[in-house]
Image (cartoon, rainbow, N blue to C red):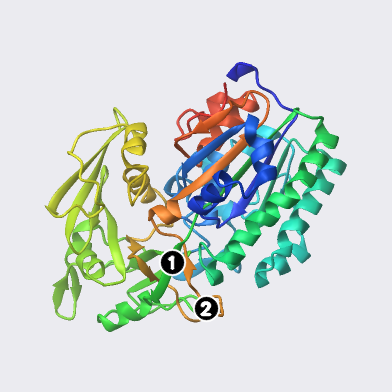
Amino acid sequence: MSKGGVRPASVVLVWLDALAGDLFRDMYKGGELPNLAEYFESGAFVENAIACFPTVSESAEGGIISGFFAGETNMLGERYFSRDRRVMMHYKFNARPERDLNPRLRGSTIDDMAGESVGMGRLIHTSSEEVVDLRASYYERVGSIEIVGRRIEVASRIARERRPRLLFFTISADYISHVNGRMGAAVRDFVKRFDEEFPKLVEALDEAYGRDNYAVFVFSDHGSADVSRHLDLPKLLGEAGFKPIYTDLIAASESGNCTALSNGRRSGLVYFAHPERGWPERPGYKRLRRYPLGGGEVDLLSLLAEEEGVAQAFAKRDEHSVVVVSREGEAVIEHDPRSNRYRYTVVRGDDPLGYDVEPRWMSEEEWLEATCDKEYPDAVAQLYHIFDAPNCGDIVLNAAPGWDFWEPWDIPYPRLVAAHGGLSRDEMSVFVLAKGPGIREGVVPRARLLDVFATIAAYYNAPQAARGSHAVERLLQ
């Protein structure tokens, strides 16, 4: 079948939350997942799909439903600081992600293309109908593996009874991964249980839509990184002489000149009030490098990047460039909007991303190929665009290996040994399995997770929807 002629009855997206890509690849290739291997033998396996930074569920979902990076969808995680309201906005309490989603992307999501969609466990509620499964929510909160069977059971019921054109549901290993480790035995049990339950879903889909008359995508939204040390960002700012607005209270604050919060606990958003004009205005790059404090001036990027728990600090330098600062060096990411190419140049010391590449202009595809196996895959384009988000901090932080920005009052895990949100390969490298009409057979060596959007757009005969996005169709014949 040609790409333009592919029109399955329905598309089913199965989102395995917080499942490390390398763990899944090892189990899949090692014969530990026989049902998935048999089913997708005639489908496609993207063994190195690069997630969206920050590596949190909101960013991944925003990319999949729109084809754009997190900075362009304005989906940076479950919380951010509102400069206008001077209060932390949290999607579990006082904000809704669909309201913050970039307005120009509304009306062109995969839900809009499908016309009729049912979501379950999703975070951005753009589907036609959202099914709330309270029992599954309980299983997720306590880290029970029973969430797998429950999600498959309910999703199968929805397929049989409703037959939606788009069924998009999550099965979360997030809590399990946080408390047991990214490669922990409990996470492996989660994957094995999914493999055992998967044939039940296939049976229901065959009954609902007819065999080989639907497409299935199975993927992880992000991985995680092992952590053992925690850096409290608001406390750090207070000790440096600032007056931080603390994020353990959702209430407007009239005092304070900065605030900081994490998403996934390994990415940090840091906000500063303008020294003269206060919170309504961002301080700008020059002020960030020479911010008045205690009768002197401080370079905020260097101050944060020199902390042991911080790997890099990022900030927008001007309309077409972003700086990357670490303890060892500094680099600049530049974008040429005319050619849509990027250049990465080390300007001081050692390369903060460890790319060791000659500074030259390259396309997004060339940067993906050049960095997908590096420690910080696909960082050039994604870091450049993260500052497009109105909700973004003035400085974005990536945690150092073994560290995160967990605040003790946050979700009271009995222990926290893995976290996500950061830019490391452990967090950014995921996988995609796909099977359906027109899907090519074999291994796809690399892709972006948001490329799923381009395939779905082709399925729904709306390839123009992917034009202008970062999504590339790689899966169809």
User: Where 145 sits versus 204, above or below?
Assistant: below
Under mark 1, the amino acid is: Asp
Above or below for 298 versus 54? below
Residue 221 horizontal side relative to residue 71, left or right: right
Question: Going by the image, does 186 lie left or right of 404?
Answer: right
Q: Is residue 94 visible?
A: no
Judge the density around disc 2: few (<14), some (14-19), many (≥20) Cα neighbours within 10 Å: few
Does residue 188 show up? yes
Which x, y percent locates residue 390? 42, 53
* Secondary structure beneath label 1: strand
Position of residue 415 relative to residue 334, above or below, is below
User: Looking at the picture, how far across and down is residue 137, in whole percent?
Assistant: 71, 65
**Which is nearer the eye, 250 or 175?**
175
Q: Nearer the viewer, residue 226 or 235?
A: 226
* Residue at horizontal 18 percent and vertical 58 percent from the top: 286
Q: Nearer the viewer, residue 200 or 281?
A: 200
What is the CA distance from the residue labelled 1 to the residue labelled 2? 12 Å
Q: Earlier in the sequence, mark 1 or mark 2?
A: 1
Specify whether 270 is left or right of 160. left
Q: Is residue 345 left or right of residue 169?
A: left
- Which residue reaches farthest front? 31
Q: Quadrant of the C terminus?
A: top right
Q: Amino acid at mark 2?
A: Arg
- The residue where tag 2 is placed is 415
Q: Which residue is mark 1?
A: 226
- Image coordinates of residue 147 in percent, x first then y, are 72, 61
Mark number displayed over residue 64? none
